């Protein structure tokens, strides 16, 4: 009996030394991804959670980008923000001047992680940085590319779409005249991003003053004085001539392309997953066209979102956030995300790894976005766009372009009106944020 008591006492003593298992630190990440992309985001989070035993990231879908932004603003005001939130590129200035964020480069460096921020692809790094320091972690970076039906072009006598808008127009009219397809191209739902903003960057056209807003809140739109006006006129002509269609109710532009009804389609490289799964055609993709008098064309600009870190949390939770951001930035993670979604790898090292493994031999169209983003050195016209209340200014521009398509305005008048309306919105943002400086305080 004495030996049993001694054994039990020793056993409980050993258990006391071990103690209870350490609970994981849990943090939330609010995001705007749904469908297949939402599934891949959940896969990414699961990979991180299984890679270590200290932290758990909980991914919470909060609707579209606008709903996520509105939700996180409300949560911050109520002093219940998530640790991380995915915000689209159009919300950059709002987040930067909010006073509610912790710059990611400051955070990860304070926590001892060695992310090489200089290795991020130039347009990606420059957009998400303020004074050379990364404000948010690039996550789902994309850019528009030119998708096309290979069979349609070959039937019309062309190997592939032309490099310039002028030659491409001839090809699309030939395809239409020969009855090869119902329409040469379909208007993208986000034409303001792909056919006006990226058009301006690639063709070295200023979109706004002060380096498209990078140099201050006093920026003003000037695209009514550039080739954007003739681009809108071109699209109107294509629409009138039946060369371009607008997707009707019940159909998306992507469906008109993947079904073979329209021969070309401009959309994000992130469309790879859907197109690979749904297309019933022999498709491929290439670079966006440029004007014939622009040589060489410049880089395109990024779309998509980044991960912002919110203020108001404990040091332990920031440890978890920093570990997750370091995981996201690793080449292996970037290569996996690139292959799973079609979004571009955010770093040059990840791109090099994908090339070394021969990934683009089997998936050549997934390299187009990286090459297009990396073309040349970004200048004031091609670094990107930093405008306050950018969603509102974009909506004003969209309404004016749609007035052109409806035959209610001429392209020049519509762009003049879009600029006037947009500049009024910019002045409202400038007034609201007068005297504010971007957050640089460490957690």
Image: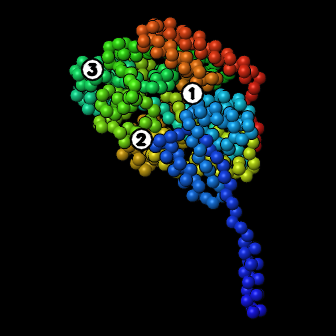
Q: Nearer the viewer, residue 170 or 422?
A: 422
Q: On the image, numbered disc 3 is attached to which residue?
A: 176
Height in image: 326 above or below 228?
below
- Across and down, in percent, residue 167 comes to 33, 19
Looking at the image, tell me whether mark 3 or mark 1 is earlier in sequence order: 3
For residue 28, side relative to residue 437 (left or right): left
Tag in front: 2 or 1:
2
Height in image: 120 above or below 437?
below
Looking at the image, tell me whether mark 3 or mark 2 is earlier in sequence order: 3
Q: Distance between the residues labelled 3 and 2?
A: 28 Å
> Which corner quadrant holds the N terminus?
bottom right
**Observer able to see residue 198:** no
For residue 109, side relative to residue 177 (left or right): right
**Observer able to see residue 73:** yes
- Provide the secondary structure element on which disc 2 rests: helix
Q: On the image, numbered disc 2 is attached to which residue?
A: 273
Height in image: 85 above or below 286?
below
Height in image: 213 above or below 44?
above
Q: Which of 172 and 42 is in front in this view?
A: 42
Q: Residue 124 carries which label?
A: none
User: Counting other residues with Cα less than 10 Å from the Cα at mark 1, is it few (<14), some (14-19), or many (20 or more)?
Assistant: many
Q: How far apart are marks 2 and 1 (CA)?
A: 27 Å
For residue 122, side relative to residue 76 (left or right): left
Residue drawn where x is 74% and y is 39% of the image: 79
Residue drawn where x is 40% and y is 39% of the image: 274
């Amino acid at each position: 009996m004495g030996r049993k008591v001694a054994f039990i006492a020793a056993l409980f003593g050993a258990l006391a030394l071990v103690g209870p298992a350490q609970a994981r630190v849990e943090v939330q990440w609010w995001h705007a991804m749904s469908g297949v992309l939402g599934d891949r985001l959940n896969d990414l989070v699961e990979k991180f959670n299984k890679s270590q035993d200290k932290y758990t990231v909980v991914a919470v879908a909060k609707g579209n980008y606008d709903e996520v932004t509105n939700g996180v603003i409300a949560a911050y005001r109520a002093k219940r923000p998530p640790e991380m939130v995915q915000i689209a590129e159009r919300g950059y200035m709002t987040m930067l001047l909010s006073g509610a964020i912790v710059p990611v480069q400051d955070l990860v460096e304070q926590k001892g992680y060695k992310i090489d921020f200089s290795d991020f692809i130039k347009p990606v790094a420059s957009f998400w940085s303020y004074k050379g320091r990364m404000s948010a972690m690039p996550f789902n970076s994309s850019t528009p590319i030119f998708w096309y039906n290979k069979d349609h072009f070959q039937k019309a006598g062309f190997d592939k779409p032309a490099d310039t808008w002028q030659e491409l127009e001839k090809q699309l009219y030939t395809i239409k005249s020969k009855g090869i397809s119902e329409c040469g191209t379909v208007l993208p739902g986000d034409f303001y991003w792909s056919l006006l903003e990226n058009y301006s960057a690639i063709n070295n056209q200023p979109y706004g003053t002060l380096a498209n807003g990078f140099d201050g809140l006093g920026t003003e739109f000037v695209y009514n004085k550039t080739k954007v006006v003739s681009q809108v006129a071109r699209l109107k002509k294509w629409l009138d001539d039946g060369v371009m269609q607008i997707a009707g109710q019940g159909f998306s532009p992507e469906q008109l392309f993947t079904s073979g009804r329209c021969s070309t389609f401009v959309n994000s490289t992130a469309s790879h997953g859907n197109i690979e799964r749904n297309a019933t055609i022999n498709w491929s993709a290439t670079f966006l066209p440029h004007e014939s008098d622009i040589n060489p064309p410049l880089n395109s600009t990024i779309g998509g979102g980044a991960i912002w870190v919110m203020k108001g949390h404990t040091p332990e939770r920031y440890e978890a956030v920093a570990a997750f951001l370091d995981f996201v930035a690793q080449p292996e993670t970037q290569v996996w995300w690139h292959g799973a979604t079609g979004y571009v790898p955010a770093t040059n090292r990840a791109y090099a790894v994908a090339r070394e493994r021969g990934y683009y031999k089997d998936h050549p169209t997934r390299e187009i976005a990286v090459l297009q983003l990396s073309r040349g050195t970004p200048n004031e016209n091609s670094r990107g766009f930093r405008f306050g209340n950018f969603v509102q200014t974009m909506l004003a521009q969209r309404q004016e372009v749609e007035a052109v398509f409806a035959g209610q305005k001429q392209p020049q008048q519509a762009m003049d009106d879009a600029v006037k309306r947009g500049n009024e919105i910019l002045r409202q943002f400038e007034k609201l944020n007068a005297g504010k400086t971007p957050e640089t305080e460490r957690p």
